[in-house]
Amino acid sequence: MKHRMLKRLLAALLCACLLVTSLPLQALAAVDVTKGNSAQENAQLLQQLEALTGGESEAAAALDTMRDLGLVDENAHFLWESSNPQVATINEKGEITILTNGAVSFTLTALNGNVEKTPADPPQEATTYAYAYATPEILVGVGNSPFLTVPESLRTTTVRGGQPATVLWSSNLTEKNRDNAAGVEDLDSVETTFTLTLYNAGDFDESAGGPKEGAQGEALDPVVSSMKDVKSSALIPADKIPYANGEPYYVTISATDNATGKPYTSWAKIEVQSPPAVVELARPSSLYITDEVETLPLTWSLATSTATARSSAWSSPTSAVQGTDVNAGNQSGSFPMNIADVTNGYRDTYTVEVAAKNATDSTWSYDSFVLYVYDRAALQQFVVDGEDTANGSTITLSNGEEAYIKGLVDSQNSPAAQQAVWDTGRDISLIADVSMDPDKPWLEVPDQFAWSAEDTTTASGTGQTHATLNYQQGALYEDITRYQRTSYGPTAEFRLSGLSDGTTKVTAEHVNTGTVAELIVNVDTLQDKLFLFQFTPAVETTLRYTNGDGVQKEVTSMADGRAAIYEESGIQGDVYLESQQGDTEYFGTLYNENLVSSEKDSTQLELYPVNYMTLRKAAQVPIYLS
C-alpha cells in the first residue's frame, strides 16, 4: 500500500515539475540530494502535497508514508536523470535545460538513503528501498527564434594552469541557416561559422556581458558547424590561457543569422587555477656517503611561481631530526643538511624530503630520496685470519717463526727436527684469509667492494708477483685477476698467497661511497733457506756444504734418506753427498744452481719442492794376488 502511494506521489512530483517544458523546470523545494529536510522545508512540502493530492488529510497521509519510507529523514535524497542528455539535461534540483530538438524522458528516483531491508517472512534477498518513476518520452524543441546562448550552468569553466579549456554554448543557428538557405542542393552542408574572441580580465565587463569599450581581444580559431557535423563547443589551447595570478579569461562566441544578417553573441568565463605545485629535489652526486661529510648542500626548485615549499630530513627509525621552512618567495634554494656521526658502527638511513603546494591547494607535492650515511671506519676495517685489522695496517706472511723451523735452528738440523718438517706433508705455504668485517649488517647489493692486489716492490728474478689475492669458486681458489667480476659482496672472503719476497698492497673500495681501505702485505719466504732432500738409496746420508756465511757444515739425513736443512744465510756452492749401504759406498754432488726451495702457491695445491738425488756407487778396482 505504501509503495503504491509512493509511486503516485513521485508521479505527482514529476507532473508538477513538467507543467512548463519551454523553461527550466524546478522540482519540489524540499528535495535535496545531500541532506535531510528541515522543519520549514517539511512545512513547504506539506503545502505542495496538499496542492497535488487535493486535500490536507491525503497530503498528511502521503507525508506520513514518505516519513515511514525514510524519504524525509536524515538520509533521504532524490536522483534526477535524463534519458538523452544530448537533447536535454536535468540537474540535481530538477531544473531542465533544453539543448536541441529531440525526444527525452526524465526519471525521478527516491533513493531512501540506500537502506537495505530483508523481510523475515517469507525469506527474500536483501532489497534496497529505492523507488523510481519515469515520465513518458517527451518531444522538445529549441524554438523558432534564432538564439545563441551559454547556459548559466555552463557559463564558467575552471581548469588548472597548463591545461586547455572547453567552452560550450547552445544555438539553433546551424539549423536556422540550413532551413533558410536557398539554391543549395545539399542543405545539410550549409555552414555556420562561430567566431571566438579571447579577452583578459581587465578588458571584459562581466556585468555587461561584453568587452569594455576599445578592448582588443585575441581572435581564436573559428568553429564551423553544419547539420552534418553540428558543433557547439571549442577547445581553448592551454598556451592561450596561462595562469595569471588567479585572473580569469573571457571568450565571446558570435554567429550570424543568414536570413536577417543579425549577429548573435554570448560569452563564457574561464577561471585558471594555479597549476599543481611541482617541486624537484636535486640528488647529490651519490646517495651513499660517509660521516666524514659534515654538511651536505641539497638544492630544490619549484615549477610553479605561487607555490610555497618546505623541506625536512629524517633518520630512521627516529623522528624528524631536521626541518626547515625553505619558502622565501624564491623558485629555488638550498637546504644545508648536517650529517651526524654514525654511532651504530655501520650506517644511518635518512629520508630527505621537500614539499610544496599552492596557497589554494589542500595537499602538498613531494619529492624525496633516501640517503645512506656510513661509518667510515666500518668501511675500512679488515679481518685477517679472524682478527680485526685496521686500515693501513701491515701484515707479514712468513714461516720463519714456525716450530719446525725453530727446531731445525736450535738442533742444527738434527734428524729429529728434520722429521718434524717432513711431518707437515710438505704443506708449507704462505697464506692468510682476509675479508671485511663479517659481523656488520651489510646489504648485499649496495655494499659491494672492489678488491685488488698490487706489488709495491719488484720480485727478485722470479717473474712472480709477491702475493696474489684469491677468491674461491667451487672447490679451488683462483687469482681474482682471472675473473671478469669488478666487485664482490661485503661478506666475501679472500685468500692471500705469498709467492716471493717483497711487498704487496691490497685495497678494498666500497663501490657506492668510494671509500678505500688498504692493507700492506710483506712476504718473507723460505727461499734459499729451507731445503728438502730425498736420496737414493734411501739410507742415512751425510751432506757437506758451505753456508752463506762461509761456514762449512756437515748434516746427517734421516735414516730413510730424507733430509731437511735450514740455513738462514743460504748455501754457497755445491752439496756433497755420501752414504753407505752394506759394504757399498755411494757418493754424489748436487750443484748449487740446481737447488730448489721456497713455498709454492697452495691455492693451486702446490707443495714445498724436494731436491731429488740418486747417489752413485763408489768406483771399485779389482786386485788380484798371485
Image (cartoon, grey):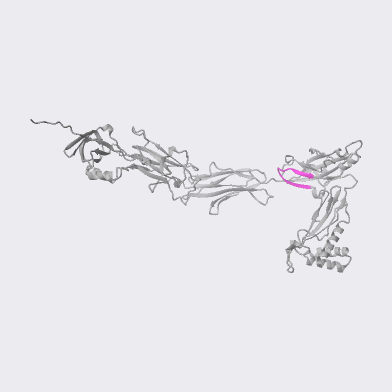
In the image, residue 25 sits, relative to residue 62, either above or below, namely above
Q: Quadrant of the N terminus?
A: bottom right
| Residue nearest the viewer, comparing 395 with 599 | 599
From which residue to which does the magenta span run? 156-167
Q: Residue furthest front?
A: 626
Pinpoint residue 159: horizontal percent, then vertical percent: 73, 46
Residue drawn at x 81%, y 58% as measured from the top left: 108
Pinpoint residue 26: horizontal percent, then vertical percent: 84, 56
State the image quarter where residue 508 is shown.
Answer: top left
| Residue 164 is a magenta residue | yes
| Residue nearest the viewer, comparing 355 with 433 | 433
Pinpoint residue 75: horizontal percent, then vertical percent: 75, 62
Pinpoint residue 624: horizontal percent, then vertical percent: 10, 31
| Residue nearest the viewer, comparing 124 with 464 | 124
| Residue 201 is a magenta residue | no
Q: Is residue 567 visible?
A: no
Determine the main secondary structure of the stretch shown in magenta: strand
Q: Is residue 174 visible?
A: yes
Query: Going by the image, does 616 lie left or right of 290?
Result: left
Q: Quadrant of the C terminus?
A: top left
Query: Going by the image, does 283 lie left or right of 562?
Result: right
Q: Residue furthest left?
A: 626
| Residue nearest the viewer, comparing 228 with 501 | 228
Query: Going by the image, does 368 lie left or right of 257?
Result: left
